[in-house]
Image (tube, helix red, strand yellow):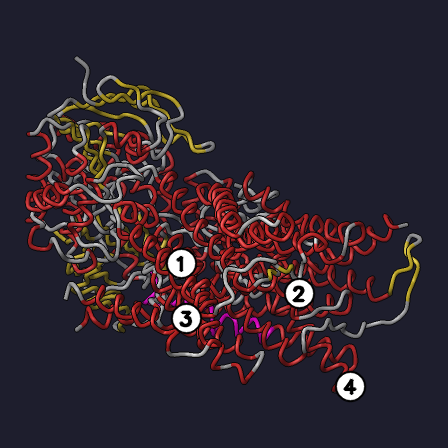
Amino acid sequence: MSAMLTVDGLVKRFGGLMAVKDIGFSVEGGEILGLIGPNGSGKSTVMKCIMGIERPTAGSVRLEGREIAGWPPHRIARAGVGLVWQHSHPLPRQTVLEHIELALLPDSLLRVVADRHVADRARAIAARVGLERVANRLPRTLPFADLRRLELAKAIARNPKVVLVDEPFAGLTSAEVADFSELIGTFRAEGHAVLLVDHNVKSVAALVDRVFAMYLGERVAEGSAAEVMRDETVRRVYLGGAIAGTTRRSHSRVSNAPPLLEVEGVSVFYGKAQALDQVSITVREGECVSLVGLNGAGKTTLFNAISGIVPSTGLIRFTGESLRGRTAAQVARAGVVQVPESRELFGDMSVRENLDLGGQHLPRATSGRLLGELFELFPILKERQAQTARTLSGGEQQMLTIARALMMQPKLLILDEPTLGLAPVILEQLSRALGRLLETTGLTVLLGEQNVTFALPQADRVYVLEHARIVWEGSPDRFAEEAGRGLL
Amino acid sequence: MTALQILVDGFAISALYGVGAVGFTLIFGVSGVLNLSHGALMVVAAVVAWYTAASFNAGPFGGAALGIIAGLIYALATFVLIVRPIQRSRAIQNEEKEIFVLTGTLLWGLMTQQAISYLFTNNPRTVLPLVEGVVDVIGVRTPVNEIITALISWAVIGLLYIFVQRTRTGKVLLAASMNARGVTLLGFELSRIYLVTWAIYGLLAGLAGVLLGAFLGVSSDSIGQLTASAFSIVVLGGLGSVSGSLIAAYVVGYIETITAYTVAPSVRTLPVLALLVLVVYMRPQGLLGRR
Amino acid sequence: MRWLKPGIAIAVLVVLYLLPFGVSGYILGLLTVAYYYGVAAMAWDLLFGFAGEVNFGPSFLVGLGAYTAALLNHYEGAPVWLCLIAGGAMAVVGGAVLAIPALRLRGPYFGLVTLVAVLMMQNLLVLFAGFTGGEIGLDIPSILTISDRWNYWYALLFMTISGGLMFGLSQSSVGLILQASGQDATQAAALGFNVAKHKLAAFCVSALFSGLAGAMLVFYLATVSVGTVVDLAIGVQFIIAAVLGGRRTIIGGAIGSIFLIGAAEILRPIGQLSTFVVSAVALIVILFFPGGFLGVALRGRERA
């Protein structure tokens, strides 16, 4: 007997980039498999290859033994694969019920009038997912959780053999998570094969039968949720290895310095999805504060709220003054400089040009001196001055991004996941550079990381962000016993 | 004889197309806007140059200067009155903004066309040449003005290159066309960068309009064709690529000149349009564009 | 409440059908043109509002229908009904040709192709002016009828039927699938719908009615020229009509079209400037009321 869904030797290449390398797994009917990996691991690409949205470069995807790789998505959908999208784009003028009816329609130009039973079935499905109260409302009047329910309802309407669910719990409250888990559980009970695609094991651990973990396009582990969470490679991929109990920083910096950045009760919504829930943190002058959290916890959102890139509610004060109403550029000029996870380098410009742009607000003499200091800190950048930024390695690009931000003489440097996608050797270099920077300049730093091994040694204080909330705060040496275990 | 004529004429017309198209590409690269009132901008500049030179004794140079200033004002008006309100509108969904900008600038161009046609009729106007006289270039009797046109065009393109490569503002502009968010994070106001870009665009396209007016003459009826030519050039060159636009300007300029000489001046844009459709079907990233 | 909207529609139609007994032939003539334009605007809205494809060259499809009918009638003396069928068919072929890039290209590129299609057609018609009549035009020996009233009724009937069919289509299952495809083609495909097939169908339907409108118009005007059916400005007028009336409503196109022709008539004293004023009004509506007349009306009701 063959499995409901079998993926074998799947490869996807985008130009020169291998996004998925030789991935293989199978899901039985009545089973839930978690497909897990941090940002950029290729898990979403695998999902899209199964659905036919991306065409696999090589390998096979079989549905009940039938080869479907390379089919167009609508054929794959008709063959029995359904996708529950993370972001829905509902139609503005159709009610919830009409959206479900849409999913029940045949792919035909000749059936102008829908069958009578379609409306009845749509109503039944709405009741099943808990949408009957709002069945006749327009999507834009619905809360986020109901929009997610609507996506689920559409998948149920298609009655697929294999259900792919993209980030099932993103943006939901814990009560809603329980509801959704139950709904997804019913897919399993009815004998569907379910694939949950998510950033981390923890959020789906209670629901899945097995987990398949990916990193940089490759398989890193497979097994029960508990096994995968204990797996050494997985821990290294997410947390950077064993969590050390002690800090390497010789001196712990004073904690009674005046606060530089105060964030109080800040919330952020993306449309209707809550990305940040009443977050409060403080960074004192001269401190290095680490914000630890897995992908999707809300670190980038918090940093973007501070930088004025996304609108937020709550209080954000810098050197005692509110940052509300200032543009992102004004915030940056005030001294809050962000090194974004996506780096945002000027790819076709040289290393030197990138750095010069950072130093443009300063008098030439100052920026020249600063440039000298930075070249000392990152010698490799001096060597590569004339090289185009796009041609640098990942680690070099990261150093360039940090150096470019330092050219602005920040009062507060925000580093968003500087370790993302970097090899361990590079990590060590970066860690040393950061350590030297903190010691020599007394710079105030807010560091967001998933990689605990990188985040802890430098930190004076640590916050843990989970599911849009701050769940723990303390010193790095208490981290391992109090917060470290529950992190993954 | 005709071949040489085409060679010389094509060179000049291509150079001035290049000036206009570089501006067009620049605003696309920096702010993602495709301006369908481009032809109107050029014609406004040319008509102002013609009118002030002829009726106010501004002379060819004064007229040209006023024409370019008119181009600048018109470009800023397009941005402030049409493009920016659409980009900032809350009533328009983000996915629809591109379409609204296209429709809005098309309407704006149409309004301009009507206004010019009402005020000055749609008869072709020829701007006073900056320099009179005819010289011999590789055996072709060429108006001095044509040579001046090519020289000015290339000088301006050179100046633009120096501006972008050597000045601080130019560098920021270039950086913004590569990565708008990166520029914001470094403390530069995008809204200011947009204004500067539109101003430069206005000056460039205004100059192109004035030169074109002195070279071939313009009328309110040429607005559609001029927009189409600029559009063809930037798409053939790959949207947002400045060097691609310059090369494409020559391809388009020569094809048009050849058509005008060998078939009829009234259909000079036809083969280019056909080429454009072909390219868009086969290679949407442009003839010279990177993927 | 449920009968309110159809009730209003029927009442308005009854009044329109009875209009020839109350108003002058001159006004009937204006409305006749408005109705043909209205069909073109509605056909445009079917493509843009429902299939999500912005077509900057509706006059390409209208022009194809018009010139096919005109040339057949002028040179071959073909009967009117045959010319109409041929015009519609030719426009469908043109619509299918336009659909090919639409299915492959995104955003500005497709808009560009449609724009180019109009300009090329304009150029070709002028280039072969000896055959096509070019800017001056070609006279058409046959006409539908010489009666103002009957011309008006034909046009109104044509608009009622095409508007009804397109509105029905937009509200049907196929319309729902089309909207889903227009909103997010990937998600629609993942729901099991062949997006290409549905969009192609939308192009063909839109082209059919545009072409028929062009062909009918030719036999009403008894002439065909670049300026009356192909010019970019004419196409823009269809777009303005649909946007003014309200996108994604189909009937908005007819309402906008009647408004535009009416406004141009009221503004006739200011001559050439009338087009300027109409464009400006359209621009203001786009900037401040992107939902158009019906959008404002419907939103007002929802709030109440």
Q: Name the residue under label 2.
A: B222
Any mark on residue C158, and which? Answer: 1
Residue toward you, B159 or B153 = B153
Verify whether residue B219 appears in magenta.
no
**Spatial CA span between label 3 and label 4:** 47 Å
Q: Is residue B253 above or below residue B73?
A: above
Mark 2 is surrounded, within 10 Å at the Cα level, by few (under 14), some (14 to 19) or many (20 or more) other residues, namely some
Mark 4 is surrounded, within 10 Å at the Cα level, by few (under 14), some (14 to 19) or many (20 or more) other residues, namely few
Bounds of the magenta segment: B72-93
Verify whether residue B73 appears in magenta.
yes
**Spatial CA span between label 1 and label 4:** 58 Å
Q: What kind of secondary structure does the magenta stretch mostly adopt? A: helix
Say which quarter of the image contains residue A37: top left
Q: In this view, does B228 lie to the left or right of B176?
A: right
Say which quarter of the image contains residue A262: bottom left
Any mark on residue B96, and which? Answer: none
Question: In the rendered structure, which amino acid carries the disc numbered 1?
Answer: Phe
Question: In the rendered structure, which amino acid carries the disc numbered 2?
Answer: Ser
Any mark on residue C258, and which? Answer: 3
Q: Are marks 3 and 2 on the same chain?
A: no
Give the chain of mark 3. Answer: C
Q: Position of residue C137 (x, y in %)?
A: 65, 61
